[in-house]
Image (cartoon, helix red, strand yellow):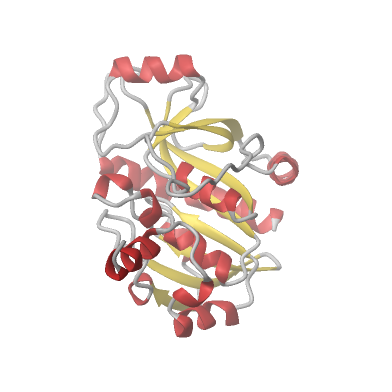
Amino acid sequence: MSWRRLKNLRRRLPFRPHNCVSSEALERLRAWGAEVAIVLGSGLRALADSAQEQIAYSVFPDIPAPSVQGHLGRFLRGSVGNARVIYAQGRSHLYEGHSAVDVTAGVRILQAAGIKRLILTNAAGSTNPEFSPGSWMMVTDHLNLTGTSPLVGQAGFVDMSEIYSAPWRAVFRRTADSLGLILHAGVYAGVLGPQYETAAEVRMLRRLGADAIGMSTVLEAIQARALGLEVAGFSCLTNFAAGLTERTLNHQEVLTTGEAAATHFAELLRAAL
């Protein structure tokens, strides 16, 4: 193998040494002193409105620039309750033409910056008739239906039997109950996209055990688990999936519903953290 091919291969590996990351930008992230990071999905940018400082994703060559409306592409320094946090405001997706390694680059950078716990949020369609739009679902498990993994390229035999931390889920459950907030719990199906699912596909996914469907999160959760991070996942249920109602689906509805639901989730985070 030529030196050039070897160099290109090393650039694609899921786990690279931290000194391959932009050192100056990484040191700025480390200096924020956060151990919790929150990845914000579509329509959830309002959660970071109180953030004090930002670093654009563009200073990290490994992170692709998000191209979807509602994904600004920056890390923000903030606090939730008594916890210092880093918000990852926006993400890139497989359907934008990126690889599984590309779309999980932010998780690896956050881990290199000292993050120990990761909260993944997303906008999702509800396949469960009892989980109404505008409410939140805590992810208990997922179905990776993207056809890929950020661990491809190495023997990454990582246990996924409890990818979403049960102790952390218990904390959020107790907190939601004490606040009187509706917080469903269920299985998230991660699909490739970018098209929404057909009614037949939704019926299939429901039979497979999915309570919500989206186009993100699962690869980030796999990467975070492989890096030893404690993971929690939350879906903002922005609409019923195809076939559950007669309405057609559109991204603007996703953004609008997510913005309206962000207040309740912010309240949950403040109390839990």
Picture mark count: 0
Quadrant housing residue 197: top left
Looking at the image, can residue 261 be seen? no
Looking at the image, can residue 27 be seen? yes
| Residue 61 spot, x, y in % from top left | 34, 72
The residue positioned 56% from the left and 69% from the top of the image is: 112
| Residue 206 spot, x, y in % from top left | 45, 18
Which residue ends up furthest to the front in the rendered image? 1
The residue positioned 68% from the left and 64% from the top of the image is: 81
Tell me: 268 left or right of 94.
Answer: right
Tell me: 106 left or right of 73.
Answer: right
Tell me: 267 left or right of 98.
Answer: right
The residue positioned 51% from the left and 36% from the top of the image is: 135
| Residue 199 spot, x, y in % from top left | 30, 17
| Image quadrant where one finds the N terminus | bottom left
Residue 1 vertical position relative to residue 246 in the rendered view, above or below? below
Residue 52 vertical position relative to residue 144 in the rendered view, above or below? below
The residue positioned 61% from the left and 36% from the top of the image is: 183
| Residue 138 spot, x, y in % from top left | 59, 38
Quadrant housing residue 57: bottom left
Which residue ends up furthest to the bottom in the rendered image? 24
| Image quadrant where one finds the C terminus | bottom right
Give 111 or 186, whichever is nearer the viewer: 111
Give 113 or 245, whichever is nearer the viewer: 113
